[in-house]
Amino acid sequence: MSSSVNAEEPRTSFPLIKEELKKQIPRITLLVALSLIGTGVGLVQPLLFKHLLDTAIPAADVRLIGLLLVGMVAVPVLSAGFNSANHYLRAYIGEGVAQRLRQELFDHLLFVRLADLEQFKTGEHIYRLTRSCGLIGEVYVGQHLLPLAMNAILLVGTLTAMTWLHWRLSLVALLAFPLSFLLTRKTRNYTQSLYRDLSNTLESGESYLNEIFPGLRTVRALNAQAHEKDRWREWLTAHRRIKATVSAFHEMIRIVLPESINYVVAGLIFAFGAFEIIQGRLTIGSLVAFAAYLPRAYAVLQTLLGTQVNLQEARINADKVDALFALTREPSGDRALPSDAVSDERRPANVAPPPGAALAFNNVSFDYGRGDFGARDLTFRVEPGEFVGIVGPSGGGKSTIIDLIMGFYTPRSGSIALDGIDLQELSLASLRSQIGLVSQDLFFWNDSISRNINYPRPDEDAGAVSEAARAAQIDEFITGLPRDYRTVIGERGLTLSGGERQRLAIARALRKRPRLLLFDEATSALDALTELKVRTAFEQARAGRTAIVVAHRLSTILAADRILVIDQGRIVETGSREELLTLRGLFHDLYKAQSFDLPEIAL
């Protein structure tokens, strides 16, 4: 499907962040305004100290002393109120950025080629969708990037006030800034390396947990609990080690070393300030006010250093998110099948369904990139309403045919046509609307039977759901349950038996009213009696439809109009059951191996 590939450019994290921040300009403007007001209020308090010490107390002005003391109490309260509003806006905007990244990434992953998506573990997808996007938006943007404006305003205001009090002392105070920034810059590469290791460790832990819980039955069946306990302890040890290293290094770069520099500079300031007081160029009140401003300036410095450090963490997580954004989306043509208008589930029940679909493979080849072929020069045609079985040894390429028909993978060469239209020209939505797929690996939501059959339609149609269930021969079972169609079936339908899941999957496929039914090894894990029920359901379901059944058990396809025998990606035999048995080839061997009575060919 290369002729109509989605031409949309891959998205990346930082352009998305810019787009979202542009949308948030009104809130950011309000944030800056609150920062200006809050900074102005906060800068007043040291000046109150100066007037108290230099004017009110020497003049014994009780009224002025009282007013100054009231101001010293009121100013921090007002400042705290502005800071709270500021914090809320930052959190709201940061969460908006995280939400945008999560939504865009999730939307993208829904359409990524399966071959590309399968390169990553499920836990990696989850970690990057939740943690990585959250760290970029909520932590970096909300807690570090947005406060830059507030910190810049606060720093400028504080330095202005300090310079007004004593410009020479301000020059001494500024010594801490270049020294601290130089130190942070020198350690940037090591910081990135540490955050990359921490992120990889967290990602591997999430991937492990996503694997272990669905596999607990297997773990217990193999008495592997001790082995898994050891694996989890190893991860906990590795996580503790890297987390402690990152925390210690972060603390050292952001706090310990800058504070050491600050204390040295503060000592110089007091020494120089004392000298200036002795020389009569500075008052005690001015030095106290200057000393009150100094921690504010250095607090801003530490915040700016923290932003530099956290920028490395944000970059690491952005790289992880961008690796998913870079995955290629499924190609999709823009042409719809003419039958779309009459074949979907909205067609009235009294309107006759359209005829089964016609399917044609023409010299189709495909490989999974492992050095082997899933399909080699496949050429065959399936007529409308025909029942075609596909059999052959395991790994021979049978399921690859189903994946290619569904558009999950794209042929390396050759073409596939549905109703005479090349799949490259069809939109995948149009193609898949015509197909009902029942696979070996069934998936169900932890929801009611009705909603699973009706999925993904938001509005339940009880009549259509029960109609599909009756056609799948499972209605009687469902209505016998205490909550009938409202019964919740558990994660992946684990409260149902294998045969019940298969028939439920058939009902879900029939709810679409498809023209083409695809069964992929749908009965391979069932006992003989359950398989018979599923085969009965299939026989009723395929009436008037084209059906292609990939089978491990030959009993599933013995009634097929035609059987394709696949081996090493090629069609090696084709014909009816009787014709294939007379060839005494691979089908004959498979038939004999499954203990069928060769002289008597009846089902």
Image: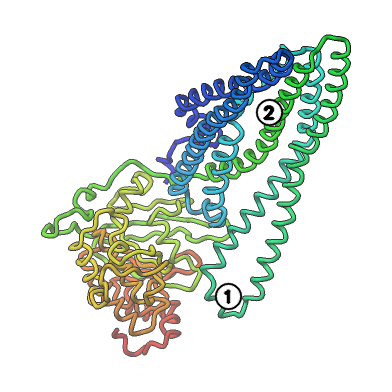
Residue where numbered disc 1 is placed: 219
Task: Say which label, 1 or 2, has the lower sequence index.
Answer: 1
Q: Quadrant of residue 463?
A: bottom left
| Residue drawn where x is 63% and y is 20% of the image | 68
Dot 1: element: helix
Q: Position of residue 45 (x, y in %)?
A: 64, 22
| Residue drawn where x is 27% and y is 76% of the image | 481
Residue where numbered disc 2 is placed: 300
The amino acid marked with disc number 1 is Val
| Residue drawn where x is 65% and y is 36% of the image | 311
| 292 relative to 164, above or below | below
- Left or right of residue 213: residue 260: right
**Disc 1 to disc 2, C-alpha distance:** 53 Å
| 233 relative to 126, above or below | below
| 126 relative to 452, above or below | above
- Left or right of residue 292: residue 499: left
Q: Position of residue 174 (x, y in %)?
A: 78, 20
Camera-side residue: 479 or 172?
172
Camera-side residue: 572 or 2?
2
Camera-side residue: 396 or 516?
516
Dot 2: element: helix
The amino acid marked with disc number 2 is Val
Q: Position of residue 202 (x, y in %)?
A: 63, 54
Q: Position of residue 24 (x, y in %)?
A: 46, 29
